[in-house]
Image (spheres, rainbow, N blue to C red):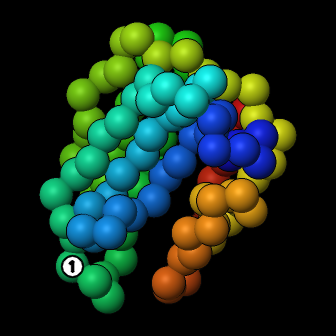
Amino acid sequence: LSDNTANNFLDLGVDYMNRPESFIRMGGGIWFDNRHTPYTLGTVLRMGIAYQNNNSINAANGVISPLGTNVSIPTVNLLALGNLSPSLPRYLNGTIQKIKYYY
């Protein structure tokens, strides 16, 4: 989720070391950043994030992150699937089995 800039977004993905990660960036500053231990390529990876101001958490394959209690949520208007955002090209190399988004 983003406003199509590098300054405001919520990211749920995998970093260059195969670590499931999520982070929340607002106004260019990172407010929530959590990475899990690397997963095995080719296996199913289950990830999730729950967020609201001063109360954010993520999970990967059943492991829950520490609670983020000092978090500001940016205003976003773009859902990019398989890509961080058009202005930050990082593309999915695999498939998405299921997506659930609750508002």
x, y percent for residue 19: 27, 61
Q: Is residue 67 above or below residue 91?
A: above
Q: Is residue 40 above or below residue 55?
A: below
Q: Which residue is mark 1?
A: 40
Three-letter code, disc 1? Thr
- Which SS class for mark 1? loop
Q: Nearer the viewer, residue 8 or 72?
A: 8
Q: Is residue 20 above or below residue 1?
A: below
x, y percent for residue 74: 67, 25
- Please say whether residue 46 is visible from this viewpoint: no
- Please say whether residue 3 is visible from this viewpoint: yes
Query: Residue drawn at (36%, 51%), measured in percent from left and top?
Result: 21
The quarter of the image holding the C terminus is: top right
Q: Nearer the viewer, residue 31 or 53?
A: 31
x, y percent for residue 94: 50, 85
Query: Residue drawn at (47%, 11%), measured in percent from left and top?
Result: 54
The quadrant where residue 41 appears: bottom left
